[in-house]
Amino acid sequence: MTALERLARTPIAALEFTNIVLTERDAPIGTTPKDPIWTHRTTTLWRYRSSERRHAVPIVLVFALINRPDIFDLRPGNSFVQFLLEEGFDVFLLDWGVPDDSDAELGLEHYVCDEIPWALREVLRASGGQEVSLLGWCIGGTLCLLHCALEPDSPARNLVALTTPIDTTGSLYTTWVARDSFDVDRVAEVYGAVPGRQVDWANKLMKPVTNYWTTYRRLWQQVLDGEARPDAYQAMARWVADNPPFPGRAYRDWITWMYKENALVRGTLRLRGRRAHLGAVEQNLLVVTAGADHIAPRAGTLPLLDAVASADVTHLDRPGGHIGLMAGSKARKEIWPDIAEWLTERSDP
Amino acid sequence: MADDRPTPEQELRRLYDDAETRMAKAAERVVGRESFGEVLAMLTENAVALTRIGYDAMDLVWSNLRIASKQDLLRLGRRLGRTEDKLELVLQEVERLRASTEARAAQDGDGAQPRSRRRAPQRSSST
């Protein structure tokens, strides 16, 4: 395309660019058919419809508290859930919902000691099995690990931890929130539920130019070159912008224990009086790290490999970012098959 | 070969990309400094203080108008949440008792068929 042609195309490109950005909230995400199995407070346990269930051990997907779990089922053609269903798994999703200020008193213990075990109970009831595979992503991975560490009778046979923060020493979050001048108690008390927008703003601030400028500049370039893929951009942009509030007490627990005290890796984290010791985790464990992950850096996840008591530990390291690793255009070829293969080998009676 | 040389437009784009990459790295260095963390902590404190003032003022207005304030609604929401917790625990206990009753009946060989439409849990969790 010559410079003159590019100049001539600029007005229509501007219109298309504006249209893509303005209509991103209409993009369909999380469209794979599913049914609610159980609800409690804001939490819903979903089961995806499938007629091809071949493996005895169902998979329970657990996402973080700061974004919606639709990333597991981003869009048709790029859905991890769809991929797992095609591989013959019985797939459940533990959806934390959208908490509000009346949920401010819910701490991490609510999710780890109540919601996860109660949901697993319903999964067993619905699937008729005796064991499950837990697949947690980001904070969801940490919650699953805490559950396995605290519940010796957990029905979890397999545990997959995707880009999960474990040791926060030296992380950017630690630089920001571990200092005494960051009064997490006051933030939690005043907000009740910390607005999702603020958490998202902090996350984006970690890479300000990339998140606030490069994303849009790249889209503009793609539109100008006639190479834009509105469906892919809009699905991801809609998911990124959908930030549920973080219940105040859970926020305080997370910041204090993970960043101010680094309690998980030190073995000092206690929930309802019980010590959550990673050495008590005995499940078959798959740890997935992303080389360019700035939210849960690889170095902060690796200590998990030596901390657990599991006899079967596998580590997969791939290029990519915290989210792009699993939801990017290359995920279907580069990481999903490896995860499915690992699970398949451990999902039969 | 002359054909391999980048056009002025390509050269311009490359220079821009380099500049943007350098800018991104510089920005990441800035936000990674301790001093930036201190600024962020102060900004957060100010935002929290302003939010509290806003909430208090609005609550004062609503309560003077004899209209339920945010605090009233939150109290109600919390009570509903706790009631739901208790109901869930009661439900689990009922299911546990039903499962054990049915298991005992089956052991006694009275031929009683399970009446529950829901299957008994395979493994209960500690709560």
Image (cartoon, rainbow, N blue to C red):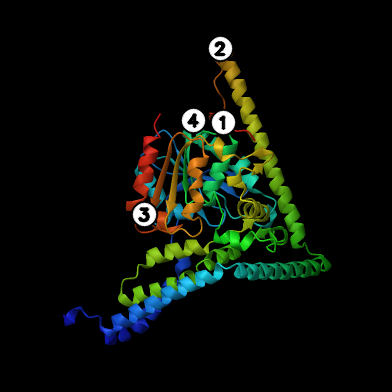
The quadrant in which residue A114 appears is top right
Residue B109 circle label: 2
Label 1: which secondary element: loop
Please determine whether, in this image, residue B114 is positioned above or below residue A149.
Answer: above
Q: x%, y% of residue B28?
A: 50, 69
Q: Which residue is mark 3?
A: A331
| 3D distance between C-alphas at marks 2 and 4 | 25 Å
Residue type at numbered disc 2: Gly
Picture layout, residue A337 above or below residue B32: above
Image quadrant containing the N terminus of chain A: bottom left
Residues indicated by labels 3 and 1 sit on the same polypeptide chain: yes
Contact (Cβ within 8 Å) of mark 4 with mark 3: no
Q: Residues within 10 Å of mark 4 (few under 14, many from 20)?
A: many
Chain of the residue under label 4: A
Number of callouts = 4
Q: Subunit of mark 1?
A: A
- Residue type at mark 3: give it: Ala
Secondary element at tag 2: loop
Residue that carries the numbered disc 4 in the rendered image: A130
Q: Residues within 10 Å of mark 1 (few under 14, many from 20)?
A: few
Q: Residue at x 66, y 71 (%)?
A: B43
